[in-house]
């Protein structure tokens, strides 16, 4: 979001306590943030808090004489690249849906040509009320982006849909609304993530402990750098990052077929998925019954997706991952050479290491002895470092 100007509207709901965190997350992504309050927002949060995190004075009064001498509300409307309302109460959504302009925030929404996004937050019954749903339908029809709401426990003590999305998710969704910028703008990045499942019978399968967190973080980092991102994902309990197109698969063969269907025009291919190396050769068509003390399953090799991409005449910049329990660098170097990769990211896995964890440690290796350690850190942080490295190497090669 570097250099992007976001006007954040805060309305009078209890979820407003999350909005300072949203300001921080938008600024972390490089955005400039101007906060605008409705009168009722002051009943829940203090303007001084937002001024501290945004570095800008909060605006709230349409009739501020010192500001309005220069028609400041029109200047604000022109200034914004995106108007984001979070939280957006049922009352404000009704005002916006019916084109009312009786406060500074609603006036700005009407006076700006910038895209508008709302993050609804309200009681579950208010959200499901036909009046609210009609207003949401009207707004969507006009091109207003609606982020959420999520489902969960609410301040009123009830549980259901109507809870405001978390600030990190809103920030990611806001980024996806804005035109893509960054070093990979105009480039296509294809990423595989998560585990695969290889069928034994209709109810059993062989898989692994991959959570997909690293791959999904890499996909978000690629999108943050302006790329068109396609994420081919095995079964995981994660939502696709905003602005990323996900193709869901289950088996190694399905992942291979999905990758080959998307590979044309791909500039960078990153294989973070933990693809099964073997699968049952003859999966049963019916559930296998427990009739003996032993069960033998004949296994056969699965297709090697990474090698298949690297061998193509029109191969993209190809990055592999090596998850090893021992001799990490030695095994990773062998894989780099054997599969003719441009780069490999190696990490040590095992009990309580990497799989299903939020942290990771990556070692980057490339042909002719290239080596760089990214160190230990959150997967989201390492993904950003990795994508910066990949983008620099790819662009260097493309400029030759």
Image (spheres, helix red, strand yellow):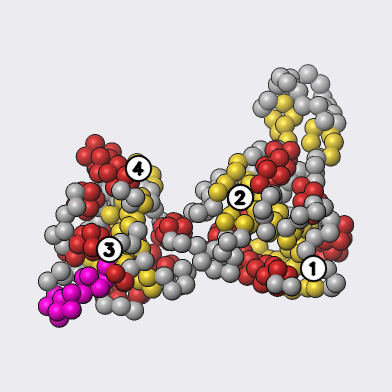
Query: CB of mark 1 within 8 Å of CB of mark 2?
Result: no
Q: Secondary structure at mark 3?
A: loop
Q: Residue at x 31, y 65 (%)?
A: 8
Q: Residue at x 73, y 61 (%)?
A: 317
The rendered magenta stretch, by its main secondary structure, is classed as helix
How many residues crowd around disc 2 within 10 Å: few (fewer than 14), some, or many (20 or more)? many
| Circle 4 or circle 2, nearest the eye | 2
The image shows residue 216, relative to residue 327, as above or below, that is above
Which residue, given by chain and number where applicable, does mark 4 sit on?
161
The image shows residue 187, relative to residue 91, as above or below, that is below
Instruction: Residue 150: give its label.
Output: none
Sequence-wise first label, 1 or 3: 3
| Circle 4 or circle 1, nearest the eye | 1
Query: CB of mark 4 within 8 Å of CB of mark 3?
Result: no
Q: Using the numbered discs, state the Cα–Cα distance from disc 4 to disc 2 in whole angstroms.
A: 28 Å
| Circle 1 or circle 3, nearest the eye | 3
Which residue, given by chain and number where applicable, does mark 1 sit on?
366
Q: Residue furthest front?
A: 400
């Amino acid at each position: 979001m570097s250099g992007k100007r976001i006007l954040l509207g805060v309305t009078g709901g209890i979820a407003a306590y999350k909005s300072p965190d949203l300001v921080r997350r938008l600024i972390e992504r490089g955005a400039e943030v101007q906060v605008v309050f409705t009168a009722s927002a002051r009943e829940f949060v203090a303007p001084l808090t937002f001024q501290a995190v945004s570095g800008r004075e909060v605006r709230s009064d349409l009739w501020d004489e010192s500001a309005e001498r220069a028609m400041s509300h029109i200047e604000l409307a022109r200034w914004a690249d995106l108007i984001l309302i979070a939280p957006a109460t049922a009352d404000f959504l009704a005002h916006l849906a019916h084109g009312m302009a009786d406060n500074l925030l609603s006036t700005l929404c009407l006076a700006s040509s910038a895209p508008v996004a709302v993050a609804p937050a309200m009681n579950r019954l208010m959200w499901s009320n036909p009046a609210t749903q009609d207003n949401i339908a009207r707004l969507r029809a006009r091109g207003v982006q609606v982020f959420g709401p999520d489902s969960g426990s609410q301040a009123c003590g009830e549980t259901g849909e109507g809870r405001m999305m978390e600030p990190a998710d809103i920030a990611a969704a806001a980024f996806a609304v804005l035109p893509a910028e960054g070093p990979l703008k105009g480039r296509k990045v294809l990423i595989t993530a998560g585990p695969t499942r290889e069928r034994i019978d209709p109810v059993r399968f062989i898989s692994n402990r991959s959570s997909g967190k690293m791959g999904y973080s890499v996909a978000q980092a690629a999108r943050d750098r302006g790329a068109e991102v396609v994420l081919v994902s095995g079964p995981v309990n994660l939502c696709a990052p905003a602005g990323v197109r996900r193709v869901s698969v289950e088996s190694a063969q399905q992942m291979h077929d999905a990758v080959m269907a998307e590979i044309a025009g791909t500039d960078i291919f990153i294989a973070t998925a933990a693809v099964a190396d073997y699968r049952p050769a003859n999966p049963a068509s019916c559930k296998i019954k427990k009739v003996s003390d032993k069960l033998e399953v004949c296994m056969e090799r699965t297709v090697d997706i990474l090698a298949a991409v690297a061998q193509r005449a029109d191969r993209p910049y190809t990055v592999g991952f090596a998850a090893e329990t021992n001799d990490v660098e030695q095994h990773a170097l062998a894989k780099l050479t054997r599969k003719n990769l441009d780069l490999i990211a190696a990490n040590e896995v095992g009990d309580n290491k990497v799989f299903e964890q939020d942290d990771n440690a990556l070692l980057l290796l490339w042909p002719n002895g290239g080596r760089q350690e990214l160190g230990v850190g959150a997967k989201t942080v390492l993904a950003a470092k990795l994508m910066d490295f990949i983008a620099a190497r790819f662009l260097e090669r493309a400029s030759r």
